[in-house]
Amino acid sequence: MIAEARKPIRGDADAESRAGGLRGLGRAVARALASSAGRACLELLLVLVLGAVFNADGAFFKEGTHRDTLRQASVYGILACGMTLVIITGGIDLSVGSVLAVSSVSFSLLTMHMDWPWWTAIVACLALGSILGSASGALVSSAKLQPFIATLAMMTFARGFAKYITGGQKISTYVTQGDKVVIKELPPIFKVIDSRILGGNLAIVSVIFIVCFILSWTFLARHKWGRELYSIGGNEEAARLSGVPVRLAKFVAYSFSGLMCAVAGICQAAQETQGDPETGAGYELTAIAMVVIGGTSLAGGRGSMGLTLLGILTIGYLQKILSINAVPEAGRLMITGIIIVLAVLTQKRRTR
Amino acid sequence: MVPLVSMRGITKLFGPVKVLDQVDFSIYPGEVHILAGENGAGKSTLMNILAGVYADYQGRILMQGREIRPASPLDANRHGIAAIHQELSLIPSMTVYDNLFLGHPMTRAGFIREKAHRRSAESALADAGVAASVGSLVEELPISVQQLIEITKAIRLNANVLIMDEPSSALNVHDVETLFAVVRKLKSENKGIVYITHRLEEIQRLADRITVLRDGRLVGSALASEMPEKRLIHLMVGREMEDHFPRHTPRISTEALRVEELTVHRANRARRPLVDKVSFSAARGEIVGLGGLQGSGASELFLGLFGAMPKRTEGRVSLAGRALRIRSPRDAIASGIALLTNDRKATGLISSMSVTANICAASMMRLAPRGWRRPREEARVASEMGRALHLRAASLEMEVGNLSGGNQQKVAIGKWLSTDPRIMLLDEPTRGIDVGAKHEIYQLMNEWTAKGICILLVTSEMPELLAMSDRIIVMHRGKITAEFPQGEATAERVLEAAMGRTNGGEDDR
């Protein structure tokens, strides 16, 4: 199959696949594998087949399972949206998990302890996330730090910042006032974000994810800025000599990633009904894995939001399948690691 | 006299292209052997074979009657052959003595004998007359000292044959003298030296023997006394003028571009500037050819004009009489300047993107004025350009990296044409493309000048320069050394100026 894929694909492959058995099938697969999108679809398909086989006594075929998959993948998915834009420039954002935590604790703090109205709290959190993202962006675009280093520093700083503003404590409805502990009412916005619509079929966090996805897709595919991100990732010097405002475009990409982290952080707070300064640790790796499994190149210049969606679903389903089969965490991590390697190896063939 | 090394019938192919064809070359003890030729004549390739960089050549290399085949630079060193490259091969962040022993350390049980290195390095530098402390980092030393260290490194390897590929290109006048002194000293020690240079002055002062290559062939080899300058230049040029250049009579009108005292500094300002106070003007509908050999500064002049190195560029530029401040490529594009760079892979195209995306890359300000792209409009522009340029692509959505060289170049041209430029800076517009595509590009240049576009053309192909230019400006080491109206320029005169001879016969330093 792998050898087949590299042969030139003939126009009559379709006809043959109808007519002739395994050979035809091989050709059809080869044709599908000729594009990143085809390979990403194949990966998702294989994971779904895995789910159908290890269906945990039919649990995999229940509607609720798929609904939950989407809901549980949503926070990661929001992070992966910003991550895609950054990775397309040839960069990386390691700070997303920590910035998510900053947003999550700030949102909890503002709404639960300081009684801000929900919308001002949301605006403040989005602004804070964008500022942290912009700081990474400035380090990368103006100070010319390597994205890995700049966002590694931001990852550490933001985690510290989250602990600083909370005093290292989880922010919940249990509020200490003087000597007494008062239990406040959970602000309604938490319930709204954690609720479902369409007869319980669609979680609000999933709606938020879909909105973020469409927003990212629109910018990447339809705005001048998206084109600039691709050209920077493809050949930064050629882009500069074509009049692309390289610094600005990169800066905004990291700011946008910060904004996505803030959105994800608010969703995270609502789902956990608290602001945990430790939350989101390791999420950056899941988000990166989702983007890369989709086929967006870590070298930059190639990829799309559509591929990222396939990556989000692949990892989302994988985690769901492992969890409904009650695979213990140790096994879950090892299997996820192996699947990531296999998936990236499939994507790698094109660039050989 | 018995040669130290003789190369016999050396042939080298790069893919299907024959870059060296049956070349003989010998190096004698106590001689400076100048290897001359235009850009792309095969000089560096020939020396890279001797230095072990390319092991897959045809022919024989004889050393004292025995055949050797240098398989790697290290292997060449073992045979006593060392190359001092244009780009120095020292490691800037390491000390002088670490560099001297790089690859050949003195060890005891696998551990480096640091103290022995220091001592031995000190005596080596003293022998060579290099005034530098062995403990300083290479990057802290002036370029001339670095070069001397590189030479010392070669001598320390008991090299008998030293290959110097344009060693003076980055040096100022004083450092060149130091270099010459070292070369003379090596000569007196009976070493054989191959010296590649584009400067007539150096040839005159150093040469004992001269060999000229042209298009990969040996066209002449003689003692320096038997090869006067005129003959040397004739041999270097010597090719028949091809007449496939369709230059129309130009309709030159008003001034389009005026450049005054444009200077482009190197990143290290202490070193000679890349472009040194260059002034000229060009008219609408005119093609001004900029001639020069490697290191002339013509490409850098373009980058400076285009705002690509704003912090290193000084000088005044005016367009159609209006003074401009160009601080970025964006400014340049907005003022109607286009730059076709000399390396479409590295700086021209984004090969992972589609033909359409590349053609529209420099016109996004116009194509998406409010930021939102209009894919249909982009497709229209791209297909229009594709038609105008006779682009042969399976689809305008295919990745540019999968096109042939000629078609890639057309995409790069299309990118600039769609910005509707008034000034086109063309740097090697026909490099690496086939004859048919070249011809098409010449015809396009005629169409553009007919529309009143002003073209500045940098090319290393002499026939192209002579035939396509209405006027030729020749540069040498960052300065203009000559200017010829069409008809007065001959290959010999251009080459003479490109090698540093100014019109008055005085050598330019």
Image (tube, coloured by chain):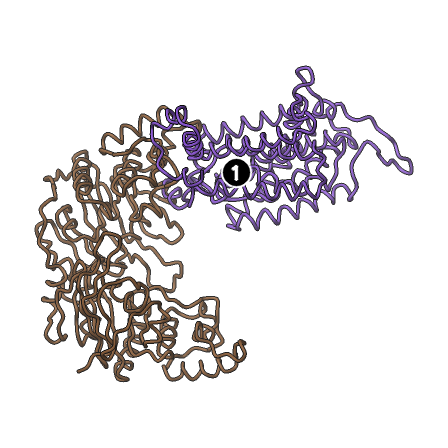
Chain colours: A purple, B brown
Closest to the observer: B122 or B72?
Answer: B72
Does the image show residue A309? no
Q: Hey, which quadrant is residue A321 in on the image?
A: top right
Q: Position of residue B306 (x, y in %)?
A: 33, 45
Q: Is residue B168 above or below residue B191?
A: above
Q: Quadrant of the C terminus of chain B?
A: bottom left
Q: Hey, which quadrant is residue B214 in on the image?
A: bottom left
Q: Is residue A202 left or right of residue B329?
A: right
Q: Position of residue B164 (x, y in %)?
A: 29, 70
Q: Position of residue B414 (x, y in %)?
A: 28, 36
Q: Position of residue B370 (x, y in %)?
A: 43, 27
Determine the secondary structure under disc 1: helix
What residue would you read off at disc 1? A253
For the point 46% across and 29% down, the residue is A221
Q: Is residue A208 above or below residue B3?
A: above
Closest to the observer: B435 or B479?
Answer: B435
Identify the chain of the residue marked 1, using the numbered disc in the image.
A
Disc 1 marks a residue whose amino acid type is: Ala
Q: Is residue A321 above or below residue B475?
A: above
Local crowd at mark 1 within 10 Å, few (<14), some, or many (≥20)?
many
Closest to the observer: B30 or B305?
Answer: B30
Closest to the observer: B450 or B310?
Answer: B450
